[in-house]
């Protein structure tokens, strides 16, 4: 979805390096999420944020940190990258449940392929 | 615990046939369920969702069926086309806005 952008799209780094992945959205959504995808597996939630002052750990937050710089920006950091953090990383956004009962559908960015050597 | 799983990891169909992708879930309290399509090199793309108080919902060439008795969800794609080839994920929404994803089914459409 072009409304959700991720940078970089590909990154190769070495063990022990600090890495930041960035996500920006123009959808005007309050909620943002970071997921990790490994081959043959579904997406697993790392961190999520329901507004700029709200940060929550997901299923697999160890080794990661996040920053919600603005409504439109949510970055994911690997403080000291390790090889088992090699994966596809996806950012997603959602608008929250609607007053009319709409579901809180998440919309995903194109992903960042991270390789840690 | 909470989990969403798929019955089949791969599905191969002939172009023009109907496809059915299945999903089992375990959390009876899920608010709604979503199907996503992921093409190679791209992020998951929303296809259709269904609230837990519904049994069926139709979209363009797609239908989602929800059987709460056996905790089963299916995605039916009518007249499958080569462009439908992708990995399909089901996801269930837990209270609090978190999604739990299944492992995915790879759909391959033969011309």
Image (cartoon, rainbow, N blue to C red):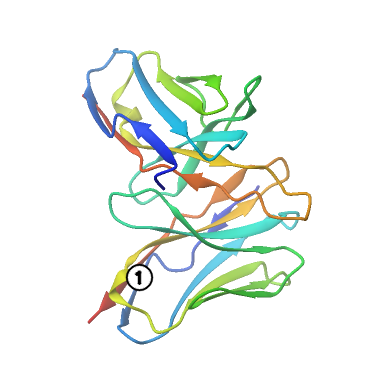
B109, above or below A110, in the image: below
Q: Which residue is mark 1?
A: B84
Q: Quadrant of residue A19?
A: top left
- Name the residue rendered at 48%, 68% in the picture: B7
**Circle 1 chain:** B
- Residue B31: percent from the left, percent from the top? 72, 55
Q: Is residue B41 left or right of residue B61?
A: left
B7, above or below A76, in the image: below
- Residue B103: percent from the left, percent from the top? 45, 55
Q: Quadrant of residue A8?
A: top left
- Residue B65: percent from the left, percent from the top? 62, 74
- Name the residue rendered at 57%, 26% in the picture: A71
- Name the residue rendered at 50%, 47% in the picture: A107
Nearest the viewer among A5 and A10 is A5
Element marked by disc 1:
helix
The image shows a total of numbered marks equal to 1
B60, above or below A96, in the image: below
**Circle 1 crowding by C-alpha within 10 Å: few under 14, some 14–19, many from 20:** some
Q: Is residue B93 left or right of residue B10?
A: right
- Name the residue rendered at 39%, 36% in the picture: A5
- Residue A66: percent from the left, percent from the top? 50, 20
Quarter of the image where the C terminus of chain A is located? top left
Q: Is residue A117 left or right of residue A93?
A: left
The residue most toward the bottom is B17
């Amino acid at each position: 979805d072009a409304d959700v952008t991720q940078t970089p799209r590909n990154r190769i780094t070495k063990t022990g390096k600090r890495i930041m992945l960035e996500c920006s959205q123009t959808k005007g959504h309050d909620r943002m999420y970071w997921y990790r995808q490994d081959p043959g597996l579904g997406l697993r939630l790392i961190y999520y944020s329901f507004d700029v002052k709200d940060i929550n750990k997901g299923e697999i937050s160890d080794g990661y940190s996040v920053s919600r710089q603005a409504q439109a920006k949510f970055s994911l950091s690997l403080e000291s990258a390790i090889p088992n953090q090699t994966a596809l990383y996806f950012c997603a956004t959602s608008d929250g449940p609607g007053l009319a009962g709409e579901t809180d559908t998440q919309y995903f960015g194109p992903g960042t392929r991270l390789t840690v050597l | 615990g909470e989990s969403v799983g798929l019955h089949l990891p791969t599905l191969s169909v002939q172009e023009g046939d109907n496809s059915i992708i299945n999903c089992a879930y375990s959390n009876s309290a899920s608010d709604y369920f979503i199907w996503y399509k992921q093409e190679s090199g791209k992020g998951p793309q929303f296809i259709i969702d269904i609230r837990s108080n519904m049994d069926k919902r139709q979209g363009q060439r797609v239908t989602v069926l929800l059987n709460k008795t056996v905790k089963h969800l299916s995605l039916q794609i009518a007249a499958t086309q080569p462009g439908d080839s992708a990995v399909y994920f089901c996801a269930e929404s837990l209270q609090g806005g978190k999604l739990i994803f299944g492992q995915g089914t790879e759909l391959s459409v033969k011309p």
